[in-house]
Image (spheres, grey):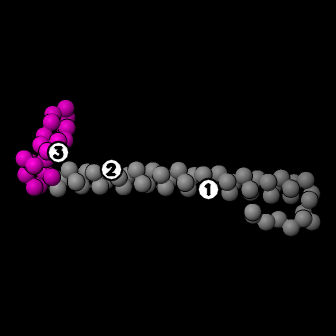
Amino acid sequence: MAEIIINGKKYEMEKLPKEAVDLINSIKFVDNELLRLQNQIKVNLAAKNFYFQQLQAILSKLEKGDSSEKISFE
C-alpha cells in the first residue's frame, strides 16, 4: 500500500477519493516541472556567463588596439 504524508498525517493512497489522488498527481507533476525548469535556468545561466566571458575577451582585445585580428566566438 502506497502512503503519502500531508501536513504530518499519513494517508493510504488506495483509500483516498479519485479527486484527491488526481490532485496529488497534479502536485507531483508540477513539482517535477519546476525542477526541470530550475535545471534549465541553471544551464541557461551557465551559457550566459560563458558568452559574457567571450564578449569580455573580445572587448579587451579591441581596447588594446588589436583590431586587426579577426574576432570570433569559439
Q: For the residue labelled by badge 1, is the local secondary structure a helix, a strand or a loop?
A: helix
Where does the magenta region start and end?
1-21
Q: Are marks 1 and 3 in contact (CB under 8 Å)?
A: no
Q: Nearer the viewer, mark 1 or mark 3?
A: 3
- Disc 2 target residue: 31
The x, y position of residue 25, in whole percent, is: 22, 54
Mark 3: amino acid: Ala
Nearer the N terminus, badge 1 or badge 3? 3
- Disc 1 target residue: 47
| Distance between the alpha carbons at the discs numbered 3 and 2 | 19 Å
Nearer the N terminus, badge 3 or badge 2? 3
Asked if residue 10 is positioned above or below residue 32 in the image, the reply reads: above
Label disc, if present, on residue 72 of the rendered structure:
none
Magenta stretch containing residue 4, yes or no? yes
- Disc 3 target residue: 2
Magenta stretch containing residue 58, yes or no? no
Q: Residue at (53%, 50%) from the top-left corner?
A: 42
| Distance between the alpha carbons at the discs numbered 1 and 2 | 25 Å
Q: Quadrant of the N terminus?
A: top left
The x, y position of residue 45, in whole percent, is: 57, 52
Q: Are marks 1 and 2 in contact (CB under 8 Å)?
A: no
Mark 1: amino acid: Ala
Residue 2: which quarter of the image? top left
Nearer to us in this view, 42 or 56: 42
Q: Quadrant of the C terminus?
A: bottom right
| Distance between the alpha carbons at the discs numbered 1 and 3 | 41 Å
Nearer the N terminus, badge 1 or badge 2? 2
The x, y position of residue 17, in whole percent, is: 7, 51
Q: Residue at (68%, 57%) from the top-left corner?
A: 51
